[in-house]
């Protein structure tokens, strides 16, 4: 029932198939009516101009122009409630980003002196 999670799931789901609040409430939870209203107000969901009275909501929002074709999933994580993320960088000649960690977990996973493991490889956080 986390509003942030329902918001992200609803935006992504409506990009794939029209959202019908009355029936999709069983999948997305009791907060869906509230979330759907807020997404309509933000310009993320809207009615289809060809069938405006059928009650379905379609994804109409584009968070960034480069993600117009890929939809909302390119701009949000449906597995995270954090808006921010931190990059874990393997320092060296090329400074390669090996992982992104959501903001809510970064401070206890990658603090100075921590050992971070990724795909069986250990990294010392400095």
Image (cartoon, rainbow, N blue to C red):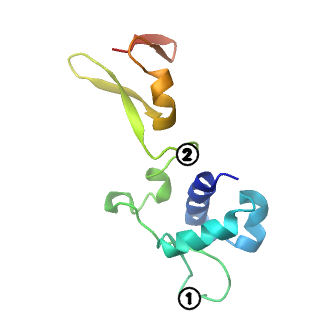
Q: Position of residue 80 (x, y in %)?
A: 55, 42
Sequence-wise, the earlier of marks 1 and 2 is 1
Image quadrant containing the C terminus: top left
SS at mark 2 in the image: loop
Whether residue 11 is situated above or below residue 41 in the rendered picture: above
Residue 8 in the image: x percent, y percent? 56, 55
| Crowdedness near tag 2: few (<14), some (14–19) or many (≥20) residues, C-alpha within 10 Å | some
Residue 97, percent from left and from top: 34, 28
**Spot occupied by residue 99 in the image (x, y as percentages of width and height):** 42, 28
Taking the spot 30% from the left edge, 25% from the top edge, the residue there is 96
Circles 1, 2 touching at the beta carbon (< 8 Å): no
Left or right of 126? Residue 10 is right
Mark 2 highlights which residue?
Answer: 81
Mark 1: few/some/many CA within 10 Å (<14, 14-19, 20+): few
Residues 41 and 10: in front is 41
Q: In the picture shown, does residue 89 fall above or below 29?
A: above
> Which residue is painted at 79% across and 61% down in the image?
26
Q: Is residue 22 above or below residue 68?
A: below
Residue nearest the observer in this picture, 47 or 68: 47
Q: Would you identify the image quadrant in which residue 3 lies?
A: bottom right
Which of 20 and 82 lies nearest the eye of the viewer?
A: 82
**Residue pointed to by mark 1:** 50
Q: Which is closer to the viewer, label 1 or label 2?
A: 2
Local SS, label 1: loop
Whether residue 38 sits left or right of residue 110 in the image: it is: right
**Horizontal side of residue 67 vs 2, given as left or right:** left
Please report the residue visible at 46 percent of the width from the left and 60 percent of the height from the top: 71
Q: CA distance from mark 1 to mark 2?
A: 34 Å
Note whether 28 is above or below 94 in the view shown.
below
């Amino acid at each position: 029932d986390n509003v942030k999670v329902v918001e992200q799931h609803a935006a992504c789901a409506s990009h794939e198939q029209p959202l019908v609040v009355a029936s999709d409430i069983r999948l997305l939870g009791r907060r869906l009516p509230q979330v759907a209203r807020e997404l309509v107000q933000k310009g993320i969901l809207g009615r289809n101009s060809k069938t405006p009275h059928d009650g379905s909501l379609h994804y109409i929002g584009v968070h960034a122009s480069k993600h117009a074709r890929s939809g909302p999933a390119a701009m949000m994580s449906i597995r995270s409630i954090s808006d921010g993320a931190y990059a874990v960088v393997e320092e060296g000649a090329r400074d390669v980003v090996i992982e992104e960690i959501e903001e809510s977990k970064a401070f206890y996973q990658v603090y100075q002196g921590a050992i971070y493991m990724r795909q069986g490889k250990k990294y010392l956080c400095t």
